[in-house]
Image (cartoon, rainbow, N blue to C red):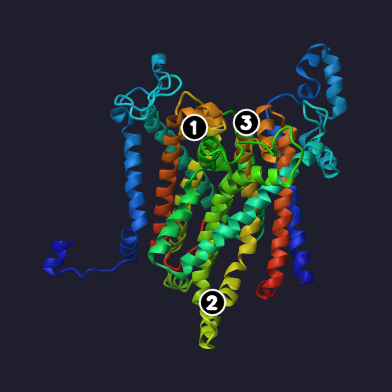
Amino acid sequence: MTKYIIQRVLVSIPIFFGITVIVYALYALAPGDPLAMLLGERAMLEMTAEEIEAARESLGLNDPWHERYVAWFSRAIRGDLGYPLTGGYTVMELLQQRIGPTLLLMATAFVVSLLVGVPMGIVMALKQYSWIDYLVTVLAFAQLSIPSFFLALGAMYVFSLKLDVFPTSGLQTIGEPFSLWDRIHHLIMPSFILAAYFAGVWARYTRSSMLETMHLEFVTTARAKGLRERVVVVRHALRNALLPMITVASLSLGHLLGGSIIIETIFQWPGLGMLGWQATLNREYPILMGIILIASTTVLASNLLADILYAVVDPRIRYN
Amino acid sequence: MTNALQAGQKLRVDTPARRAMRRFTRHRLAMLGLGVLLILVALAVLAPAVAPHSPTKQELSLYRKPPNQDHWLGTDTFGRDVFTRLIYAGRVSLSVGLVAVGIYETIAILLGAVAGYYGSKVDWVIMRAVDVVMTIPTMIVIIFLVSILGPSMYNSMLAIGIMGWPEPTRLVRGQILSLREMDYVTAARSLGLPTYRIILRHVLPGVVAPLVVHATFGVAGAILLEAGLSFLGLGVPPPTPSWGNMMSSAQTLNILERVPWLWVPPGIAIMLSVLSINFIGDGLRDALDPRGMETG
């Protein structure tokens, strides 16, 4: 087991370096002079050519790209992701401010999607080829096919503008002190809409995984022992069918974050997604780099964790 | 076919292709999807002939007119016919989906085949590259790329195409690795068949089937991505209509509440086309690989 864990960690190291190379390459591709971004166009107009050249030299902008990458990397690894053009915060401080709301949104959406999707999958698998299987299949595909922003606009139209039961935007009611109920009230629409797509994914996944497991011999054995069908389904089939879900769930993390860009922008939810969107509009590339770096590292870590967890619960993996 | 049977000369051979075709045509949802998609594609291809108005001509006297006899889905802020723009937008959205997937499946076939065929170090490097790109949240990088390249239809295709290859590369590599060891491939080799024949007749078909299924779901995903990008204003820039950018005006509550004919029809169009393509993908999966594959 220790050997397996060490092996997985070692494989993650080159992947981490690969991520940083790509993030830096994106930055290097971006148009615009880094010096102008740092000092502002106007300040540069007032400088002589020699002064500009000296500033470039002292900032290391004339170094070859691999030296600049190493310099950026050694700063980034210590948490120094640079400064955005506006506002008095560093990129790291901005990310710290915005990560909370995003985590809240993602975690809620994740739990909701499992609570909706897995039972859908079980029902489909148990009633395979019946009308209810068809109905839920169509529903699951609809969840996979409806653009999240369309669902968001529709929900806003119905629940905010017509029925007036949920607020259209924000983290909480403006001008009121924090209250748990108010936060939940604001969280429901964005998190359910973000969850819709993933519920469809889980439903499809649970269905095929359940169908596969139900035909395995240990399920037949459990039935032959005379166990009640409910026990066979829940304790024997479902448990084993959901095992590979650990991996799928960790892979979905990145997609959840991607989905939160659109959801956060529509609902004005002040998280990483909305920050990324604003950074794109203002061409604040250090912020975008920071978001991609943080997000990818989180996904990498969660994949590593999922691999290890999976090996713990399924001994077949670690003996391979 | 019927003639051959009547003459009694030819025995009806149940080839795998014919069996797959039969399974596909029996898949009710897939046939429904195919029907809807054909209509959407026909409308898009024949747009200049079918559309009742011009997609870009502005008529300010027709400012946000609700649906009526002349304009079935009303008119937009610039007095343009929404139904016409919807049809023209189909051309953009569907072709972005097709081209983006074409780009990444091509990359995937090349990289996957190289990794699977050569193995060892080349394989290691390609597979780590796959891991890296799979770890990076796609949507954010696509937004980054499009903001660097500038919003346009071709850049959307490119950005989606650049980010999509890891999953199918894994698929192609895995298929090639497992097919290489199949008994029938060994048999073909021991019969002395030339390598190109083994690859063309015995290995490639095994790769093509799952790849086609993957590409079908991929087109659905790419259409959703493009719609999202255009909705945010980073995809296809106006005045060219795309289903996504037709909806971006609904980000203001006023339009959302008072002018629903601006955002509901394109939303339904996206959903219908993506749903149809997903149904077709499901049918293809059942037809081409009865043992079942991972769900997308």
State left or right for residue A103 relative to residue B255: right
Of marks 1 and 3, the one in the foreground: 1
Q: Which subunit holds the residue at mark 1?
A: B
Circle 2 residue: A230
Q: What element carries label 1?
A: helix
Are the residues flagged by discs 1 and 2 from a single subunit? Answer: no
Circle 1 residue: B247
Residue at image point 78% right, 36% down = A94
Give the residue type that dot 2 points to: Arg
Q: Which subunit holds the residue at mark 3?
A: B
Judge the density around disc 2: few (<14), some (14-19), many (≥20) Cα neighbours within 10 Å: few
Circle 3 residue: B147
Mark 3–mark 2 CB contact (< 8 Å): no
Q: Distance between the residues labelled 1 and 2?
A: 47 Å
State left or right for residue A149 relative to residue A135: right
State left or right for residue B96 relative to residue A2: left
